[in-house]
Amino acid sequence: MLALCRRVDRKYTVMPKKSSVKSSEISLLSVPAFWPMVMAKALIDQERELYAKNLKFIGEEVKIHGQLRPKLATPNQVRLDLRTMTLRDYGSPGSGIPTLVNAPYAGHTAMIADYQAGQSLIETLLANGVGHVALTDWKSATIDMKDLEIDNYLAELVVAIDDLGGRVNLVGLCQGGWTSAMIASRFPDKVNALVLAGSPIDTDAGNGPIRRLVHESPLSFYEELVALGSGLMEGRFMLQGWKNMHPVEHYVQDQIDLYEHIDDPGYLAKEEAFESWYENPIDLPGRWYLQAIRQLFQENRLVKGEFVGLGRKLSLRDIKCPVYLLAGAADDITTPEQVLDTRKYVGTSAHRVVSKTVPGGHIGLFMGARTLKEYWPDIARWIAR
C-alpha cells in the first residue's frame, strides 16, 4: 500500500497545481527576483496537500479492511434465533402468504438481500405488493459447528417455514437457491412459489470458472483448506479465492479508484457500504462445505436425483409450484445455464416457469440498482399474484 502511495506521489508531484499560487502572491510574480520563492512555496503547499491526501487514503483503507461491519438497511424484527440463523421479519406479518428470502450461505452475510436504502431487495419486494417478507440471516460457523451437515441447515429452514405458517413463497439467492430447491422437492406443499436467482442448480451446465475449478481440483485440495481452518471453511480463504478471480480489479484498480475519489463523500459512502459487506466474510462448517463441493458441484447429485436430503432422495420433478428463474448475462460465478437449465428438471408445467436473463454479473442480481429497479418489481408482482 505504501508502494502505491509512493507511486501516486510521483504521478502527482511533477508540476504544481495552478491553484497553488494564491491571489495575494500574484503581484510578486511581476518581480523576477521573487519567482523562485513563490514557486518553492507553491511546491511546499502542494506537498502538504498531497501528504494529507495520502494520510486520508491510508486511513480509509484501514477503515474499509478492518473497522466496518455489515448492517441490514431495513427495520426488522427477530422472529427466531436458531443455531444456524436468525430469522428476521419485515413488513406486515399476517398479510397473505409470507415470502421467505433465503440468503446465500456462501461466505458473506445476508446484507446482500438488504444492502442499503434505495438499493435493497427486501425494500423492493415490500414496495411492490409483497406484504410480509422474512429473511434467513445465516450465522458464521463457530468451531462447535464444524461438523454440521446440509441436513442441519435444511431442518432449520423447515423450522423457519413452519414458524411462518407452514407455506411460503421461497426466494433463493445464489447458494440459497439449491437449499430452496431441496425444500421444494422434499416438502412440495410448503412452497407456494419458487424464485431461483443466480442459483447453481445444474452445476455441470455452462463453462464458468467455478465449474472448472471444482472439477480440476481434487477433493483433497478442499479438505486441506478445511484442515487449515481446524474443521471450518474460513471466510478469509474464500474471499482470497474470489479476489484472485479478478486480481487486477481487487489488488490494483480498487486502490487507484479509492485514491482518486478520496475527497468525494458520495463515492466514499458507496464504497464503505459495499466493503462493509464484501470484506467481512463468514465461516462455514467444514463438513457442510465438503458435502456441497463433492455432492453438488463435483457430482451434480441434485439434478441427477441422487442427493439425499432429510432421509430421502430428492427429485426436482416433485417441484410443481410456479417457478421463476433469474440469471445474469455476465455472471461468472453462476453461469446463466446453471440457473435456466432448471426448467428441464422440475415437474412444474412449462407455462408456469418464467426464465429471465438480465444484464450484469452475479452480485448485481441481488444488489444492483438497475436490476432492483427494472426487474425485481415484476418478480415481486409475480409473487404477489
Image: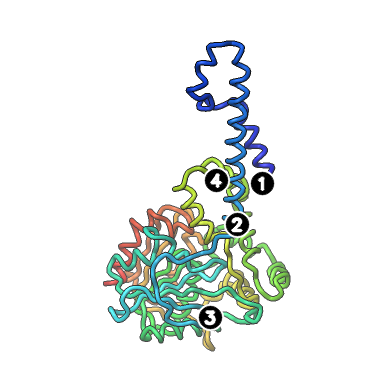
Q: Which of the two marks, 4 or 3, is nearer to us in this view?
A: 4
The earlier-in-sequence mark between 2 and 4 is 2
Query: What's the CA distance linking mark 4 and mark 3?
Result: 39 Å
Q: Residue at x 53, y 57 (%)?
A: 275
The earlier-in-sequence mark between 2 and 1 is 1
The earlier-in-sequence mark between 4 and 3 is 3
Q: Residue at x 61, y 77 (%)?
A: 288
Amino acid type at mark 4: Leu
Q: Which quadrant would residue 306 be assigned to in this image?
A: bottom right
The earlier-in-sequence mark between 4 and 1 is 1
Query: What's the CA distance linking mark 4 and mark 1?
Result: 12 Å
Crowding near the residue tagged with mark 2, few <14, some 14–19, many ≥20 C-alpha atoms within 10 Å: some
Amino acid type at mark 1: Met
Query: What's the CA distance linking mark 2 and mark 1?
Result: 12 Å
Crowding near the residue tagged with mark 4, few <14, some 14–19, many ≥20 C-alpha atoms within 10 Å: some
Say which mark, if any, is on residue 258. 4
Amino acid type at mark 2: His
Q: Which quadrant would residue 158 be assigned to in this image?
A: bottom left
Residue annotated with mark 1: 1
Q: Secondary structure at mark 1?
A: loop
Say which mark, if any, is on residue 65. 2
- Residue 126, image x and y in percent? 32, 68
